[in-house]
Image: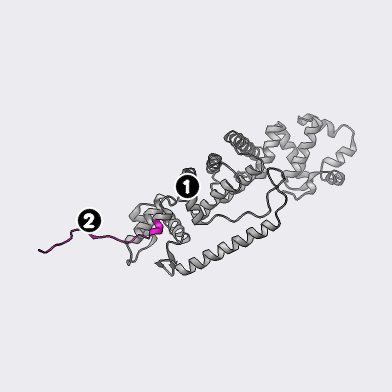
């Protein structure tokens, strides 16, 4: 009797690397998995990013990001348009060298380790710690559903599959900077709301939050309310001063929040300080305006009429220090924060 094996739909199969399943099934996003499976299925064929994009109905930019993800993960190697398995020996040597470097750094740090009896929160070191590698990230995701949730949330908030660097940075923010997952997600949502959803901005903000002990949802919400209020104030000031509308910088937001929300100056008062600044410096310098408003706030001056009254009060020394390009302001500048780098 003769036998014949009928595999049916299994008659056409293709190989999938074990590491793809073992290390990246939880780690990779849906688009990244679709792209690598499509590429493996079309092994031996010529294709372009646009071919993958049309076939999967995803953006070409997402295809490129996904390919970069798999290349950085060591699943594939891309050279001169050829996609191939990675050089395993090279990866092993690189991995061993990295482990040796880490061991050496640990030994060096151990020798210089100060007494354990120190403050609970040490000052931030000048250089950032090394970001976790993909192996460690994969291990943490297999151990912690919370980390998986963080990475999945990042994909949704960014509106694209996050790459290895994004994921490593988010894990470092959680484990090295000490921000809880829910706080990091709130920070990412805020960044997206102001069109600054990039990993560099998020990391910078996360470091600031960590340094200022913003580690709970309540603290994060309060901080975001302050930032939002400051941005709104900065946009209002742009209109008051007739400046070109743009996304306020962090420093502009800080100044605007202080001028309008803390010191409670009106638009007329801010305009008055602006005019003095331009008359004196021939340009708009926010730090100089800040110094003028600071003096007014400390002196209880809150209306343009009071400013004019002080100017005409007969105190010539104050006039020389504060007003007009024809006055000597050197003494005022010597005691003012404007001596610092002008911004």
In the picture of the structure, the residue carrying the numbered disc 2 is 9
N-terminal label among 1 and 2 = 2
Looking at this view, is 216 or 226 the one in front? 216
Q: Position of residue 251 (x, y in %)?
A: 67, 44
Name the foreground residue: 330 vs 9. 9
Residue 333 occupies quadrant: top right
Under circle 1, the secondary element is helix
Q: Is residue 49 visible?
A: yes
Q: Which mark is residue 343?
A: none
Residue closest to the eye, 188 or 113: 113
Q: Is residue 8 magenta?
A: yes
Q: Quadrant of the N terminus?
A: bottom left
Mark 2 Cα within 10 Å, few/some/many (few <14, many 20+)?
Answer: few
The residue located at (78%, 39%) in the rendering is: 292
In the figure, is residue 44 to the left or right of 236?
left
Q: Is residue 93 magenta?
A: no
Question: Depth-wise, is mark 1 or mark 2 nearer the camera?
Answer: 1
Q: Is residue 115 left or right of residue 245?
A: right
Q: Which residues are magenta?
A: 1-20
When asked about the image quadrant of residue 49, the answer is bottom left
Residue at x-position 42% and y-position 63%: 76
Reply above or below: 272 against 152: above
* Residue visible at 82% across and 45% down in the picture: 325
Q: Crowdedness of circle 1 by 10 Å Cα count: few (<14), some, many (20+)?
A: few
Q: Which residue is mark 1?
A: 143
SS under mark 2: helix
Residue at 68% across, 49% down: 124
* 107 is higher (above) or lower (below) than 228: below
Residue 338 percent coordinates (x, y): 78, 46
């Amino acid at each position: 009797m003769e036998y014949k094996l009928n595999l049916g739909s299994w008659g056409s199969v293709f190989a999938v690397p074990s590491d793809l399943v073992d290390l990246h099934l939880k780690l990779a996003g849906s688009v990244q998995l679709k792209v690598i499976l499509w590429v493996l299925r079309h092994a031996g064929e010529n294709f372009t990013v646009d071919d993958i994009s049309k076939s999967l109905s995803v953006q070409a930019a997402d295809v490129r990001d996904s390919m970069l993800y798999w290349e950085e993960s060591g699943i594939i190697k891309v050279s001169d348009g050829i996609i191939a398995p990675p050089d395993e020996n090279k990866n092993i040597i690189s991995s061993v060298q990295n482990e040796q470097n880490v061991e050496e750094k640990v030994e060096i740090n151990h020798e210089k380790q100060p007494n354990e009896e120190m403050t609970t929160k040490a000052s931030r070191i000048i250089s950032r710690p090394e970001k976790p590698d993909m192996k460690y990230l994969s291990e943490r995701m297999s151990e912690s559903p919370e980390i998986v949730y963080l990475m999945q949330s990042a994909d949704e908030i960014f509106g694209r599959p996050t790459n290895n660097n994004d994921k490593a940075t988010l894990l470092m923010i959680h484990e090295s900077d000490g921000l809880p997952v829910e706080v990091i997600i709130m920070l990412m949502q805020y960044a997206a709301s102001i069109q600054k959803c990039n990993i560099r901005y998020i990391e910078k903000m996360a470091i600031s939050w960590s340094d200022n002990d913003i580690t709970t949802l309540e603290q994060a919400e309060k901080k975001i309310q302050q930032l939002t209020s400051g941005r709104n104030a900065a946009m209002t000031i742009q209109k008051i001063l007739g400046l070109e509308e743009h996304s306020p910088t962090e420093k502009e937001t800080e100044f605007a929040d202080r001028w309008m929300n803390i010191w409670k100056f009106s638009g007329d008062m801010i305009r008055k300080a602006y005019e003095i600044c331009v008359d004196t410096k021939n340009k708009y310098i926010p730090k100089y305006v800040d110094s003028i408003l600071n003096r007014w706030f400390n002196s209880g001056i809150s209306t343009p009429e009071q400013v004019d009254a002080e100017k005409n009060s007969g105190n010539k020394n104050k006039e020389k220090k504060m007003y007009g390009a024809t006055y000597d302001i050197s003494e005022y500048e010597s005691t003012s924060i404007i001596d610092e780098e002008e911004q």
